[in-house]
């Protein structure tokens, strides 16, 4: 069963935000004018035989909850066999953020935390993250983030794997870090950081199979790298069928392909009951 580790079910307030103008220009998608039923997202998954997805909440410094934790929890409750949640918190209020993360994991059953650095214009080494890292370790859940350039209309510097992800992994070696969007144009940096740190992983969200850089494909085929790369889409930016098109051309052996599409996600996010 294929697992998507980075996807959103978009709300109107998320979809209409001006920072996504560039993505709409690239993809030809239109901003929503009405809320969409969760069944449309399920249908997109079914079309590509994606059995399970990690739905992200989104919280911004000025915008507040663009996709709230409670909205994600409602979709998960409606379809517990298809979804789990990733929490979003207010980075500007660290103690409130820690309490919200504990609520999401303990009460709502979420599987991790996601903070998008460019949204906050704060690199992962910013001191406001550090209580959250300690809490993720305490709760036994991954910290998920974005690496690489920024498609939305925000600065890209916060997405550098070196020094930011490297330094966090040095400061918190017990922290599981899942770095989404592969790190382009710093993909080699991201691979180097994943090689160096036992608990650092990469997901391929926001890239179709045909656009995955060669250096990451080579890493996926290596003895250690095959256990370090996870499939993601960044849906609805990229549909599941589009993201998987061309997968056969990557030359992955059967074991590596299974780990990429399923096995690594089940292990990293504690989804061992998914088969």
Image: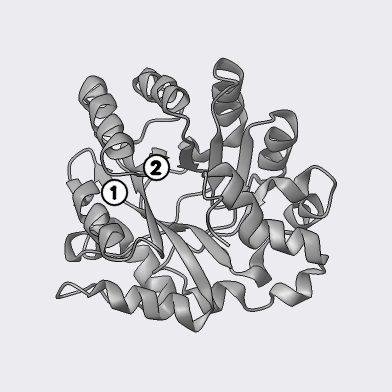
Residue 249, percent from left and from top:
77, 75
- How far is disc 2 from disc 1 in space, using C-alphas? 9 Å
Q: Nearer the viewer, residue 20 or 12?
A: 12
Q: Residue at coordinates 30% horizontally, 35% vertically from top-left?
A: 106
The residue to which callout 1 is attached is 58
Secondary structure beneath label 2 = loop
Disc 2 and disc 1 in contact, CB within 8 angstroms: yes
Q: Is residue 228 above or below residue 3?
A: above
The residue to which callout 2 is attached is 116
Residue 133, percent from left and from top:
43, 24
Residue 150, percent from left and from top:
45, 50
Q: Residue at coordinates 67% horizontally, 62% vertically from top-left?
A: 212
Residue at the far bottom in the pictured view: 47
Q: Residue at coordinates 57% horizontally, 43% vertically from top-left?
A: 268
Residue 238, percent from left and from top:
47, 70
- Quadrant containing the C terminus in the rendered view: bottom right
Q: Quadrant of residue 174?
A: top right
- Quadrant containing the N terminus in the rendered view: bottom right
Q: Is residue 12 above or below residue 163?
A: below
Q: Quadrant of residue 228?
A: top right
Q: Residue at coordinates 56% horizontally, 16% vertically from top-left?
A: 171
Residue at the far left in the pictured view: 34
Q: Nearer the viewer, mark 2 or mark 1?
A: 1
Q: Earlier in the sequence, mark 2 or mark 1?
A: 1
Q: Nearer the viewer, residue 60 or 172?
A: 172
Determine if residue 184 is in view.
no
Left or right: 268 as drawn, with respect to 256: left
């Amino acid at each position: 069963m294929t697992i998507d580790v980075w996807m959103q079910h978009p709300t109107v307030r998320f979809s209409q935000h001006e920072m996504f103008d560039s993505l709409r220009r690239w993809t030809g998608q239109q901003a929503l004018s009405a809320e969409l039923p969760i069944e449309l997202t399920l249908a997109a998954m079914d079309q590509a035989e994606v059995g399970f997805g990690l739905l992200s909440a989104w919280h911004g410094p000025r915008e507040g909850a663009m996709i709230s934790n409670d909205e994600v929890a409602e979709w998960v409750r409606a379809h517990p066999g298809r979804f789990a949640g990733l929490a979003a918190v207010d980075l500007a209020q660290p103690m409130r953020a820690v309490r919200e993360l504990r609520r999401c994991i303990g009460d709502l059953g979420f599987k991790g935390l996601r903070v998008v650095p460019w949204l906050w214009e704060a690199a992962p080494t910013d001191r406001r993250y550090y209580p959250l890292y300690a809490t993720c370790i305490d709760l036994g859940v991954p910290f998920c983030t974005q690496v690489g350039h920024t498609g939305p209309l925000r600065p890209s510097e916060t997405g550098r794997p070196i020094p930011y992800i490297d330094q966090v992994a040095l400061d918190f070696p017990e922290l599981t870090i899942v770095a989404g969007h592969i790190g382009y144009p710093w993909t080699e940096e991201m691979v180097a950081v994943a090689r160096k740190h036992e608990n650092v992983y990469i997901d391929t969200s926001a890239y179709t199979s045909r656009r995955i850089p060669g250096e990451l494909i080579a890493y996926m085929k290596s003895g250690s790298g095959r256990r370090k790369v996870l499939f993601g889409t960044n849906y609805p930016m990229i549909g599941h069928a589009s993201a998987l098109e061309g997968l056969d051309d990557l030359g992955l052996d059967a074991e590596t392909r299974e780990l990429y599409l399923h096995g690594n996600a089940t292990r990293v996010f504690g989804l061992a009951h998914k088969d």
